[in-house]
Image (cartoon, grey):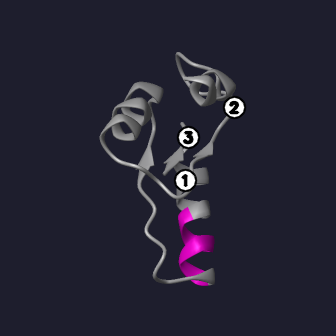
Amino acid sequence: MLAGDDPNHIDLVKTVFAWADPLTEIEAVTMPREALGRLDRQPYDAVLLDYDLPDVHGLELVRR
């Protein structure tokens, strides 16, 4: 999962991952609450977080 509030950065990260490994699936969210909800419902192999998310700092999201 990729959590970030800048659509351009999200697109860039998804493009780089698609180029490096076309089979990689990336779900992107823009709000921390959405990220927490998804993490409660399913496991992810990796989570990439923006530190400066709306409402919650990225490190606080990691602690939760």
Looking at the rendered structure, which numbered label has been put on residue 53?
none
- The three-letter code of the residue at mark 2 reads Tyr
**Which residue shows up at 57% across the image and 49% down it?**
47
Looking at the rendered structure, which numbered label has been put on residue 51?
2
Considering depth in this image, is 58 or 14 the residue closer to the camera? Answer: 58
In the rendered image, the vertical position of residue 38 relative to residue 60, given as above or below: below
- The three-letter code of the residue at mark 3 reads Gly
Mark 3 crowd level (few <14, some 14–19, many ≥20, 10 Å Cα): many
Local SS, label 3: loop
Q: Which of marks 2 and 3 is nearer the N terminus?
A: 3
| Mark 1 and mark 3 residues within 8 Å of each other at the beta carbon | yes
**Which residue shows up at 30% across the image and 40% down it?**
41
Q: Is residue 33 left or right of residue 59?
A: left
Task: Specify the farthest residue to the top.
Answer: 55
| Mark 2 and mark 3 residues within 8 Å of each other at the beta carbon | no
Give the magenta-colored segment's residue range.
Answer: 14-19
- The three-letter code of the residue at mark 1 reads Ile
Looking at the rendered structure, which numbered label has been put on residue 4?
3
Local SS, label 2: loop
**Which residue shows up at 37% across the image and 32% down it?**
34
